[in-house]
Amino acid sequence: MKTQHIDYGKALLKVLELIIVKPFTLPWHIYNSALRNLSSSGADDSEEKVLANDFPLFTWFIRMFDALIAITYPIGIVMALIAGLNKYMGGFGPFLTTLIIAYFMPLGIGLIRELYQITLKSLLYLKIISKK
């Protein structure tokens, strides 16, 4: 059995990236991905166009998660302003807490979307393979 040299510096940097950096950048990437999916839904090779005839309800259901992710940030900002300007319990604390919750909300919605989207991607790839 051949042993490989382990670069502990690279491993430590990757661990720090995955634990510290990734959780804070991932919600923004998920949000941008949802916006791209919604804007390219009319393309000829999109999941919606290819599978809409066979699975209209399922494709609508998956696109609904993209729509929920797309409205997360605007609704989060409005709710943060309401929480911050609330006369009784308002202030900077509720404002900041609501913004933080709204920022990380696409992670939860995106996870649910991806769990459902696994079957949709499988169907899409099977349909593409069957046409070849």
Image (spheres, helix red, strand yellow):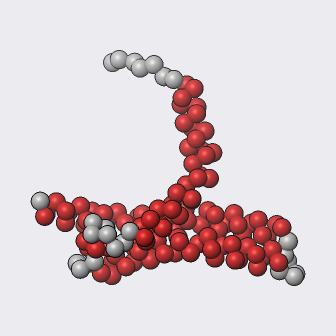
* x then y, percent, for residue 30: 51, 60
Residue at 48 percent across and 67 percent down: it is 35
| Residue 100, quarter of the rendered image | bottom right
Q: Splitting the image into 4 quarters, where does residue 105 fall?
A: bottom right
Quadrant that contains the C terminus: bottom left
Q: Is residue 16 toward the left or the right of residue 48 in the image?
A: right
The answer to whether any part of residue 111 appears in the image is: no
Q: Position of residue 81 (x, y in %)?
A: 76, 75
Tell me if I can see residue 45 in this picture.
yes
Identify the image quadrant of the N terminus. top left
Q: Quadrant of residue 113?
A: bottom left
Looking at the image, is 20 positioned above or below residue 104? above
Residue found 60% across the figure and 39% down from its top: 16
Q: Position of residue 125 (x, y in %)?
A: 23, 61
Q: Is residue 20 left or right of residue 116?
A: right
- Residue closest to the far right: 88
Q: Residue at x 33, y 77 (%)?
A: 58
